[in-house]
Image (spheres, rainbow, N blue to C red):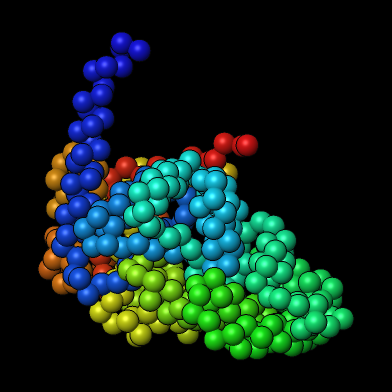
Amino acid sequence: MVKFITLIPLFFYFNSAKAQDTKAVAQALSDKVSILALGDPTHLEGTITTQRIELIKALHSEKHFSVIAFESNLFEMYYGYTQFLKDGASKHIYDGMYGIFPCQELNQLMDWVKVCNSKQDSIMIIGVESKFTGNNTLAHLKDFLTEEINSLDNILEDNLPLYYETLGTLIESSFYSRKIDDTEKQIIITETEKLLYHVESRKSDDFKTLVLKQTLINIIAEANRLHNSNSADKNNDRDFEMAKNVKFLHPLGKMVLWGSSTHYLKEPKAIQTHYFQKNNRITFGKLLKRDFPEAYFFIAYSSLEGKKTNLLFNSKVKPPKQGSIEFEAMQLKTPGKASYFMSLNPLNTLHLYTGEHQLDCRMLGHSYAEMEVSEVCDAIYFIDDTQPYTKLKAD
């Protein structure tokens, strides 16, 4: 153990420097901002995950952000969070997420939330998707419906077994992005509307009841989405439902959105690629910009160098090329610093960039695309040495 003693001061120095950097970002953020999206290139970056966690801690202490909403199913994340509150096991929350999200680095967030909640400094973890994302969803839904709706058999009469069977088909189809047929859609919508009518008749503002109501609304929305044969519309419909779920969650307090930058783009048409120019892509971020023009703020993450992964193999993130926003950041960054924050919107005044905004940027999948960066996002956090995340250890 003795040979490690000399490393301890250096460890604390880097942690302290990182905390100071994120604290400065949080302090410079306008109090008008209450929905802050932190978007990643691929979900698979460990360094970006760690940096986001540090920023969330600063946003909580400096600006009182108290809700962390993942790009995952609202009900599944709520159910996992309620179980997490009982025994502190992060697995409950991970089971509700997209399978690509959980990683060793994310344990830091769960540990911090656990400590905050033990001090009555409440942090909520939830999801914003109507699309199903997790494990054991049908069993959890059955438990939740049985617990929250009295006389479930009487409401659905003899159709409860068929409803559960078809709900299982919907969940599987949602998870694998498969179409459902007319009969499946009709069963889901007819029976779910019966349950929704019963829940709405309670006229309760208890949060658990409100989550139940929103879950039923999301089930109907997902049945309609999966019945739609147009894949472009399916993507827009998915983002539309996420925006509606944020409206539902917004009264809970200031929230951080955690997911892919692709969903958080404020103006997709500002990106000069075939996909965004030829498709009428209406993103989650575009909808939030419309509905919350000053409250919504999007920070994208990008890499200056390091490694990226597709889970099969790692490859190098090359140094930034001239004519890219990453190259501009490299010139502005203090040598030796692990990251550089660049604001493109006066709602955050830290390192407000005044140079050319029509530049190449690789915030999306580590691949360059020409874009009007200030129309696409409000700020970019550049990571100097991006590294892939560490997979969770098997139980």
Residue displayed at 52% across by 57% down? 81
Residue 61 in the image: above or below residue 11: below
In front: 105, or 275? 105
Left or right, 202 with respect to 229, comes to left
Left or right, 239 with respect to 95, comes to left
Left or right, 369 with respect to 5, comes to right
What is the quadrant of residue 35 in the picture?
bottom left
Residue 232 locus on image (x, y percent): 57, 80
Residue displayed at 71% across by 76% down? 150
Where, quadrant-wise, is the N terminus in this rendering?
A: top left
Extreme residue toward the top, this view? 2
Residue 118 in the image: above or below residue 205: above
In front: 364, or 395? 395
Residue 357 locus on image (x, y percent): 21, 71
Residue displayed at 48% across by 63% down? 126
Residue 161 locus on image (x, y percent): 84, 73
Viewer can see residue 109: no
For the image, the number of numbered tags is 0
Where, quadrant-wise, is the C terminus in this rendering?
A: top right
In front: 227, or 140? 140
Viewer can see residue 64: yes
Residue 170 locus on image (x, y percent): 72, 73
Residue displayed at 61% across by 37% down? 394
